Image (cartoon, helix red, strand yellow):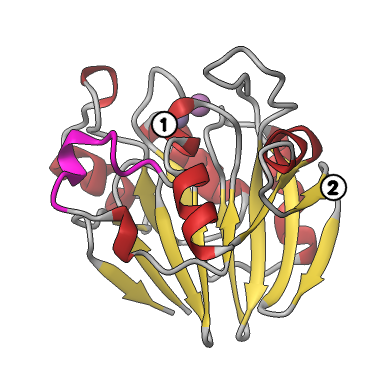
Amino acid sequence: MKITFLGHASLQIQIGETHILVDPFISGNPKASHMDINSLKADYILITHAHQDHILDVEAIAKRTGAILISNFEIVSYYQNKGIEGHPMNHGGSWEFDFGRVKYVNAIHTSSFPDGSNGGQPGGFVIEGEHKNIYIAGDTALTYDMKLIPLQTKLDLAILPIGDNFTMGIDDAIIASDFVECEKILGYHFDTFGYIEINHEVAKRKFFDKEKDLMLLEIGEYIEL
Ligand code: NI
Ligand code: MN
């Protein structure tokens, strides 16, 4: 499993020959101005919630690639009305896709579309594929529901928001990594705008002091599990 950071909360995950985009917000991210959304491959697009900084490039990429959306019922319905194909899910549900198993899990946040449409309730994803398991938290507060994940899934990586203000900050993300029982963390949802700027060295040190590994990738950088 290869996971590429595309800036903010945008990820590209490659499982075998399948390309999965998560929360594509690239054309509107000033830090990602060197990225071209027309060069991104996508067989599926996972959407955690309907905020602008998670869905901005969904329509353009889905229409170019024919990618299938995976998100909550309201978000998938919104895009189906625009002629885009999708697989609706809801909290607690899992589905076996050709690349692996996906579960839509709880997040504490909000989820309206930029135009005011109902984006349902926000979520995160647990993905099991190629014998590797990852948790993508989405935008969320620290929540006790995270403790449910390791009851069923032994995680190889937890992708957690760390920028504070709109989501968990560093200290809560460390507790979240305890709740999901994962020592390897990829931080996201930081530095994109003023409200969520963090000190990288302080963040890494805090995780290190708890014997955990916080990875912060440059845009375009990837890790392999
Ligand atoms: Ni959000
Ligand atoms: Mn966000």
Q: Is residue 74 visible?
A: yes
Amino acid type, label 2:
Gly
Vertical comparison of 102 with 84: above or below: below
**Magenta region includes residue 30:** yes
The numbered dot on residue 25 is: none
The numbered dot on residue 92 is: 2
SS for callout 1: helix
* Nearer the observer, 26 or 218: 26
Q: Please provide percent x and percent y for residue 94.
A: 83, 60
Residue drawn 16% across the image and 40% down it: 31
The numbered dot on residue 53 is: 1
Residue drawn 29% across the image and 47% down it: 7
Residue drawn 82% across the image and 64% down it: 95
* Nearer the observer, 23 or 205: 23
Please give the range of residues in magenta.
25-34
Residue drawn 60% across the image and 85% down it: 130
* Nearer the observer, 179 or 87: 87
Give the quarter of the image for residue 116.
top right
SS for callout 2: loop
Label 2, label 1: how far apart the Cα atoms are = 24 Å
**Relative to residue 137, is residue 144 drawn left or right?**
right
